[in-house]
Image: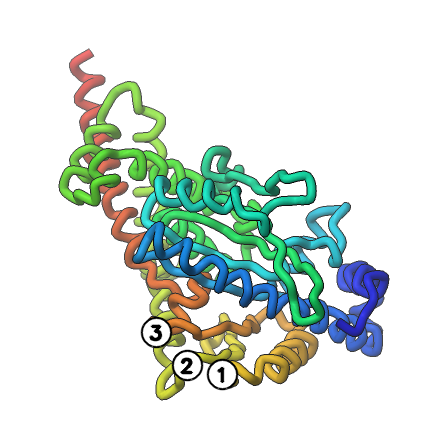
């Protein structure tokens, strides 16, 4: 790493300062420091991934792992959001997401990682946040645990590992899709009240579903029956009301169009799915894809780089981020394609298939319909 800690800290302040908008030299210098700082996490990120693989797949053979370097936009948002946050102390520049089948497997892997020296501080404690036991206000559920791994310069770098279930993951991915196309920033609990309530209530319903015996046994028929029976019960009226809200929200028409919320969301997902198919057509499994997506026109530009060309890809990525910084129509992302399933698996935030999410929304809608009329009948009897 060619920049000092003071230079990195200064770059963090400059990223959120007003001068960078008008000073091209300052912008260029700041992005150069940021690029170097992010790149210093690459080897540590790869080491962490290799360290985790055997533990993950022995816990859940169907699990998948996705790694990423934090995007400039996300870094800036985090610096602005937390007054005491500095760039050099940001712990999730390098991140790995692990998606497992259920909460039992998530807990098993988490307990195992807590015993590993790489995830312990000098005092033997483990730094983590359990958003499954205590979900965020927006409904986000996952476990975050911080590990330390060496880079090429033999420096220990923080790597954040996120553990979540498949259902928690499709919730988060769906929220990302809406944020990507609507610029609401729901991920930071901003945006319209309607959308925030929708995702919060869906998270609540998913938590109920994941607690059902049928879900734990992977018995779809029993799970559907159990969930509907749960929603019908008089003591679960609040959950029924949430399910009704979800039903009404996704079926209402977008003003001035023939789209419902659900059909518009499906359009977004289809667009991302087509990107997934396009960028890897004829490409090898290993490498990086640099994307520039215009979220209003649908225009997609792609550049492919081999695994050995990461440094070149990273510089090009920073160039586009700099030149397109003032244009909110464009989303720039550098994603890895290191799995057979392609980018949809390697970086699911942008290319995940939303079918699972909407299959469960369909179940919630069914339960809402039955629960509502059961409750109305109950009122008439009383």
Verify CB contact (< 8 Å) between mark 2 and mark 1: yes
Q: Left or right: where does residue 366 sit relative to residue 324?
A: left
Given the current orientation, which residue lies at the most extreme top position?
382
> Foreground residue, 231 or 65?
65
Given the current orientation, which residue lies at the most extreme left position?
221
Circle on res. 125? none
Label 3 sits on a secondary structure element that is loop
Q: Which residue is mark 3?
A: 340
Verify CB contact (< 8 Å) between mark 3 and mark 1: no
State how far apart marks 2 and 1 are (Cα). Answer: 7 Å
Which residue is painted at 79% across and 74% down in the image?
Answer: 2
In front: label 3 or label 2: 3
> What's the image's color scheme?
rainbow
Q: Position of residue 356 (x, y in %)?
A: 29, 54
Q: Position of residue 64 (x, y in %)?
A: 38, 60
Which residue is painted at 66% across and 59% down in the image?
Answer: 157
Circle on res. 279? 2
Label 2 sits on a secondary structure element that is helix
> Foreground residue, 349 or 359?
349
Q: Which residue is mark 1?
A: 302
The tag earlier along the polypeptide, 3 or 1, is 1
Q: Is residue 269 above or below residue 192?
A: below
> Foreground residue, 83 or 115?
115
In front: label 3 or label 1: 3
State how far apart marks 3 and 1 are (Cα). Answer: 19 Å
Q: Position of residue 210 (x, y in %)?
A: 31, 39
Q: The C terminus is located in which quarter?
A: top left
Q: The N terminus is located in which quarter?
A: bottom right
């Amino acid at each position: 790493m060619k920049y000092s800690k003071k230079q990195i800290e200064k770059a963090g302040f400059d990223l959120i300062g007003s001068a960078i908008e008008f000073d091209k030299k300052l912008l260029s210098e700041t992005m150069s420091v940021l690029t170097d700082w992010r790149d210093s996490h690459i080897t540590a990120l790869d080491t962490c991934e290799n360290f985790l693989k055997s533990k993950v797949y022995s816990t859940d053979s169907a699990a998948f792992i996705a790694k990423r370097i934090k995007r400039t936009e996300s870094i800036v948002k985090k610096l602005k959001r937390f007054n005491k946050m500095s760039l050099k102390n940001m712990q999730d520049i390098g991140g790995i997401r692990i998606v497992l089948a259920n909460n039992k497997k998530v807990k098993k892997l988490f307990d195992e990682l807590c015993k590993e020296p790489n995830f312990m501080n000098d005092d033997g404690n483990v730094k983590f946040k359990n958003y499954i036991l205590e979900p965020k206000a927006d409904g986000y559920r996952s476990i975050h645990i911080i590990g330390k791994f060496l880079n090429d310069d033999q420096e220990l770098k923080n790597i954040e590992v996120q553990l979540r279930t498949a259902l928690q993951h499709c919730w988060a991915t769906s929220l990302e899709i809406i944020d990507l196309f609507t610029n609401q920033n729901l991920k930071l609990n901003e945006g319209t009240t309607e959308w925030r309530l929708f995702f919060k209530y869906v998270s609540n319903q998913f938590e109920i579903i994941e607690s059902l015996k049928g879900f734990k046994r992977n018995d779809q028929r029993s799970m559907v029956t159990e969930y509907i029976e749960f929603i019908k019960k008089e003591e679960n009226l609040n959950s029924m009301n949430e399910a009704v809200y979800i039903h009404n929200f996704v079926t209402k028409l977008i003003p001035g169009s023939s789209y419902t919320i659900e059909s518009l969301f499906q359009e977004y997902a289809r667009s991302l799915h087509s990107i997934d198919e396009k960028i890897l057509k004829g490409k090898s499994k290993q490498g990086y894809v640099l994307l520039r997506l215009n979220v209003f026109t649908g225009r997609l530009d792609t550049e492919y780089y081999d695994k050995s060309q990461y440094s070149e890809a990273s510089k090009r990525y920073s160039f586009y981020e700099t030149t397109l910084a003032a244009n909110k129509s464009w989303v720039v992302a550098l994603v890895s394609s290191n799995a057979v399933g392609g980018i949809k698996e390697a970086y699911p935030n942008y290319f995940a298939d939303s079918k699972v999410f909407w299959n469960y929304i369909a179940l919630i809608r069914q339960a809402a319909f039955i629960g509502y009329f059961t409750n109305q009948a109950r009122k008439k009897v009383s």
